[in-house]
Amino acid sequence: MIQRVRDLRDVRTDELVVNMGPQHPATHGVLRVVVKTDGEVVLDLQPHVGNLHRCKERIGENLLYGQFMPYTDRMDYLASMNNELCYAIAVERLIGVDPPERTQYIRVCMAELNRIASHLMSVGTYGLDMGAITPFLYAFREREVALDLMEEVSGGRMLYHYIRIGGVALDLPEGWTDRCRALMTEMDRRIGQYNTLLTWNRIFIERTAGVGVLDRDTAFDWGITGPALRAAGVDWDVRRDEPYTVYPHLRFVVPVGHGTPEGEEVGVLGDCWHRHWIRMLEMEQAVSLVRQCLDTIDSLPRPAAPEEISAKIPRLLRPAAGEVYFRAENPRGELAFYLQSDGSTNPWRLRCRGPSFSNIAVLGAISKGHLLADLVAIIGSIDIVLGEVDR
Amino acid sequence: MTPLPASALADAAKALWDLSLVRGLAWSVFIVLLVITPMALMSIWLERRLSGKMQARIGPNRVGPQGLLQTLADGVKLLAKENLVPTGADRALFHLAPIIVFVAAFGMYAALPWGPSTAWASPSNIAVGVLFVLAVGSLEAIGVIMAGWASNNKWALLGTMRVAAQVVSYEVPLGICALVPVLSAGTLNVQEMTLQQTGGFWHWGIFWAFPGNLVAFVVFFWAALANLKRAPFDLPEAESELVAGFHTEYSGMAFSIFFLAEYAGMFVLSGVAAALWLGGWDTGIPGLDLAVKAREAIAADAAGWVVAWNLVGAAVMAFKAMVLVAVMMWLRWTLPRLRVDQVMRLCWKFFLPISLLCLVWAAAWVAADVPWMRGAR
């Protein structure tokens, strides 16, 4: 029997609950988002995390201080050097040592190089989420060189275990700084190309501008950090505002979204496009930072003996009872380690604050009412690494 | 009952053959096997190599010269794969869908002319060729919708919703744009339209009712992209949003048929665009008018030359279609994907009014009946 529809209210539509992930291609890993949709419109969503949980903190409490270092690599595996740097400085503050000056520059150089590689990955996969496949492969071409450079010093392409408590594993190989400089020259040219291909692409702007607006108050409420926070117009960067290692000696600006129509910006302050744009600008700054570090590394003499690359620390660390909380600016936001020592050889408590975990929580707050395709854009622009969300 | 004499059988066969439907069918079977499938395979190879070049990588280059046989090797591999049917799927529709898509994509070829000798370079010679292409082509959407519906998968269903909205919408500007050269040429027969475009490239369809047909060609090309679900309109199978869209649940040969149909569709719609606006098999070189050459060869009773000129025509046609296919690939590897509402807005707010304007413009030219404006009629 055919029923006549007299009124649109007679048409019964249902909400559809779809499971986005954990094997969905756009969730960048094993994020599972349960989305309640009305057609293509997202009514409600709930991110489920924990598929990659590996009890990092508990493991850390059962290991010696130095033994936990490789585990930090596996948290935000796209920014392993930054993780190592953060943990190393946390422990160094607990035991009160400082690495030699040249080593400090090497560490910052590695961290910034890793920031470039990480942002390349983030920008590239963001293009992939938007359906632009080629920028992804272009970004990987440059990332490949950055990974080669880090492989040269550490032997690993992803998980380095290069930065150690009190210093680094080994000094830089001969000619490394020149090869790194060549990459930086290449990057100067390439960043402009990525912008042409992606940032200023009309369709890309249509897809990202004004989508998933994360304003200043929401950002504060949810503890957003990193590029997502600066894209919301908050001028905050731990490297500048709570300086650590040699950042006070380096010149860099912190890119912040303005949201003003004048100047080189489109869209609304705090939207997906701004988060992408801040990453592009940060990449430029990171290139400049690597250059400054390379110049300083070259101007300082190599240590007389190979082991002098690191500060002298006892083989078995027994920090005096006490605690330390240290946060560092990672490519995805603030990574922080809280260490509490009871005077024994392993931390009594190890706590980690991961930026991806805090940033992904805001997903539900900013993506309601958007389309499914926008949800992909928002997840990509927040840029999470599930290894760090779950730890 | 006395057996029929052989001559009667031959007469019956001849009468049957003279029915254009049967001849068209035989022609279709022939070209499906010997022309389109290699063309589709070539397109897939071209896409892979071209995207490799564009993306600073190599692409397949191991199987056969320059990797030409890679797609064939993949096809053989896919043949050996199990054709999985998900639980809860509508089995009949699930199996029927790829067949419909395949038939629709390959059926469109029947209307394409391949050379100046109408009798066998365009033997089906459908009087309403343009209509035929549009009608058969729109069947593909039904197959795709079937596939998504029958899969019992939410992502496939979402993809299907997008297909239903997108492909059906874009058929409107696509059809209207195809009508613009029809108006200018005064025929729906693709071979006749091509014949009108011979005698130098300035007689080509894009210059008819200037700029009406030129604009219609551009809009047709973009609407064809949307109809074929190609980037930047590849939302129904957007891999980053809907896993694989309507063919999420397809595997093995059923999947590869969707794949093949996509490339066959690209090639045939490019061929239609080439035949309607870019002179089809016409070389466009003033001294080398294939229609004239073929007529001369027939007059001189030189069968070899007739075949040769028709083969040149087929090559020219394939080349033009391939160029358009390459442009489609270039766009795919350059542009991001539009969002579903933007796709709809583009169709109804821009493509439809523009195509209608073109139609009115072309109609005005026909009404004015200025001979030099309508090419070499």
Image: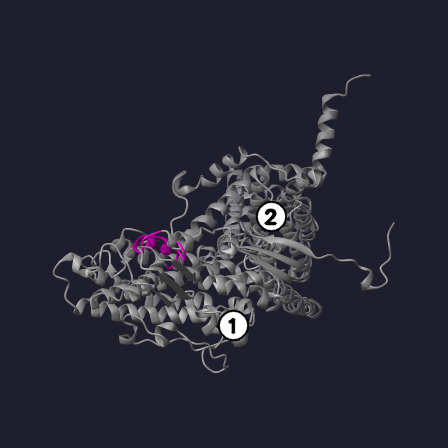
Quarter of image, res B31: top right
Residue A54 lies, in percent from the top left, at 44, 50
Residue A139 placed where, x, y %?
A: 39, 60
Residues under labels 2 and 1: Cα distance? 62 Å
For disc 1, the marked residue is A219
Q: In the picture provided, is A145 more to the left or to the right than B124?
A: left
B88 over A78 or under it: above or below: above
Q: Position of residue B343 (x, y in %)?
A: 62, 63
In the rendered view, how is the structure colored? Answer: one colour
Please say whether residue B120 is visible from this viewpoint. yes
Question: Residue placed at 60% from the left, 46% from the top?
Answer: B247
Q: Nearer the viewer, residue A358 or B356?
A: A358
Quick one: label 2, few (<14), some, or many (20+) residues within 10 Å?
many
Residue to which mark 2 is pinned? B113
Question: Is residue A303 left or right of A280 when viewed as pictured?
Answer: left
Q: The disc labelled 2 sits on which kind of residue?
A: Pro
Please report the bounds of the magenta region as a residue range.
A63-79
Give the amino acid type for the residue marked by disc 1 in the picture: Ala
Parent chain of label 1: A
Observer-nearest of B335 and B37:
B335
Mark 2 or 1, closer to the camera: 1
In the picture as drawn, the residue positioned furthest to the top comes out as B1
Give the image location of residue A330, x and y in percent: 39, 65
Residue at figure coordinates x 70%, y 53% from the top left: B131
Q: Chain of mark 2?
A: B
Q: Secondary structure at mark 2?
A: loop
Residue at image coords 50%, 79%: A259
Confirm or deny contact between disc 2 and disc 1 (CB under 8 A): no
Residue A64, magenta (yes or no): yes
| Vertical position of residue A291 compared to residue B143: above or below | below
User: Which type of secondary structure does the marked residue at label 1 adopt?
Assistant: helix
